[in-house]
Every structure is written in C-alpha cells, then in structure tokens.
Amino acid sequence: MSKGILLFAIDTDEKSYTDMARYCTEKIKEHLNLQVALVTNKDITDSLFDHVINIESVEAQSRIILSTGVKESWNNFGRYQAYDLSPFDETILMDTDYICHSNKLLKLFDMNQSFLCHKRRVYLGSQIYTDIEYFGKQLEMYWATVIYFDKSNESKCVFEMMKMIQKNYDHYSKLYRFRSSPYRNDYALSIALNTVYGHSIPKSVEIPWSLMNVEFNTEITLKTPTSWELKFKRQVENKIIDYRITTYDQDLHILNKDALFTIIDNK
C-alpha cells in the first residue's frame, strides 16, 4: 500500500505558494520521510517533489484578512479533486502552510480509518481559548488543513459532496446562512461530512489531537530547526499584555503567511 502527502499550490500575484510548498516538502521529507505529490498550475521540474500533477489555472478569488484588513488573492478552488488526483493508496492532504516539526502525522496511517480530519483546534495568539469553531447556523466546523483519506467509497463520497458544494456554493451559503464569498474548503468539508454521515458525524473521523493554528497577527520566528518563537498581545481585563511562547517539536498551521515567507527567505 503506497502512502504519501498531497499538496495543492496555485500561485497568486502576491504570493508564491509553490515556494511555500517547497519548504513544506523539505519538512515533510525530514520528519515524515514520505513521498510528496504536488498539484499545481506551474511547470515544475524540481526533484524535491516525487510527483508533479498539473491542472489548469482557475480565476482566483480575493479575501480580506480580518485581523489586519489586508486584501489578497486566494486560490483554493478544486480541493475536491484530491481523491482522483492522488497517486497514493493512502494520502494525507495538507495545506502548504502546515509545517511539520515532528512525525506525529504518521499515526494517521495506523488508525484504521478511511477518512480523518481535525475538528478541535487551538489558536496560539490573542484569541481566548475555545476548542471548536462554528459557522453559519451554529454548524460545527471541520478543518480541511490536514485530511487523511484512502481510496474507499466512504472517502470518495466526501470528496464528491465537496465538489457539489463548491459548484453550488451560493445555494449552500443561503441554506446554512454564511457568507458566499470567499469560498472556504473548511465549510465545504463540514457540510459534506454532515451530508455523507446523515448529520450525525462519528467521532471516529476526528484526528484525535488539536490543530495548532498561528493567528494572522501573531509574530513567529524559527529559533532552532525544530522550535518556534511566537509573540502576540492579549487583553487581560483592562490591560494589553505581551506574550511569548516557544514550541518544541510541534507541527503548526501558520496563518500568518508573511511571517512564513520571511522564515522561508531566511532559512
């Protein structure tokens, strides 16, 4: 049974997601020692990737980062193609801003499940701790940042449903009462899981640890090859207090892309 990582990297005018994919892949090779397949619209011959799968370009959408007010292009369409595009029997589909500093994801291959993703998350930053995120009509959100799947009909049904949701996103936004723009794979995944599992999603699809998110306005620097330093401000009662966190051997989902690109440029 072949096992590997699948990455999607579609460059925008502002950011090179293929550069991010290279850094992400370097860490995958270092800590997971798995093959990596890259889905992209660029002609890439980099031997770092074991497979390069070319797809046609689609028009990018735009989003505004609420914490900073910055508007940027964002091309996250077509993630539902992962099932058909993956060359592996067992796949971990991963965002390129998820950086491995451990081998923890290897546990997903031993869990005897067809489909796995994160439900619980922690924000390392100013946000007060809550472990579940909601959207629309108080629908619990599942994260598309890291998804394990095999080639079973169960997994196929989830991705086929995500395809239908993307193609009819305006309809689903009205049905579940969330904004129709920008398109979010997290929302599509959450609705797909609810549909496939009859609005009673089994706990067995949850990755049994929290997704560690670094907020958009949290400063992050690489201190050693496997440790991060995070700096942020948090209001405590009537005071703004500076915080600093150092993580060791911890995988992070780095939402602050500018900080991540600085790390990549300085590596």
Image (cartoon, grey):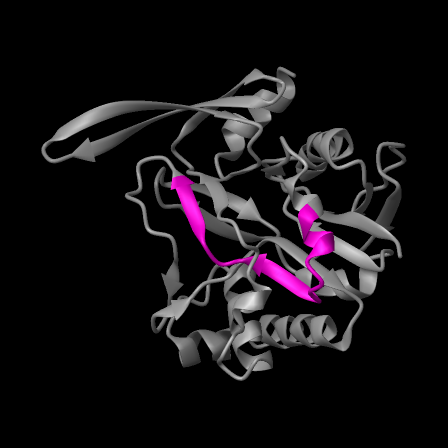
Residue 191, relative to residue 236: is it above or below?
below
Residue 101 in the image: above or below residue 131: above
133 or 249: nearer the viewer: 249
Q: Nearer the viewer, residue 6 or 111?
A: 111
Q: Looking at the image, can residue 168 be seen? A: yes
Q: Quadrant of residue 32?
A: top right
Across and down, in percent, residue 255 comes to: 49, 39
Q: Determine the residue located farthest toward the left in the rendered image.
A: 238
Q: Quadrant of residue 164?
A: bottom right
Q: Is residue 135 magenta?
A: no
| Nearest the eye: 247 or 47 | 247
* Residue occupying the point 64% across, 35% down: 100
Specify whether 144 is left or right of 6: left
Q: Residue furthest bottom?
A: 198
Is residue 161 toward the left or the right of residue 178 in the image? Answer: right
Residue placed most toward the observer, 167 or 49: 49
Instruction: Give the side of residue 241 with respect to residue 85, left or right.
Output: left
Question: For residue 108: magenta?
Answer: yes
Question: Residue sitting at 86 percent across and 46 percent down?
Answer: 52
Pinpoint residue 26: horizontal percent, then vertical percent.
75, 29
Give the position of the C terminus as an image quadrant. top right
Q: Give the range drawn in magenta.
A: 107-123
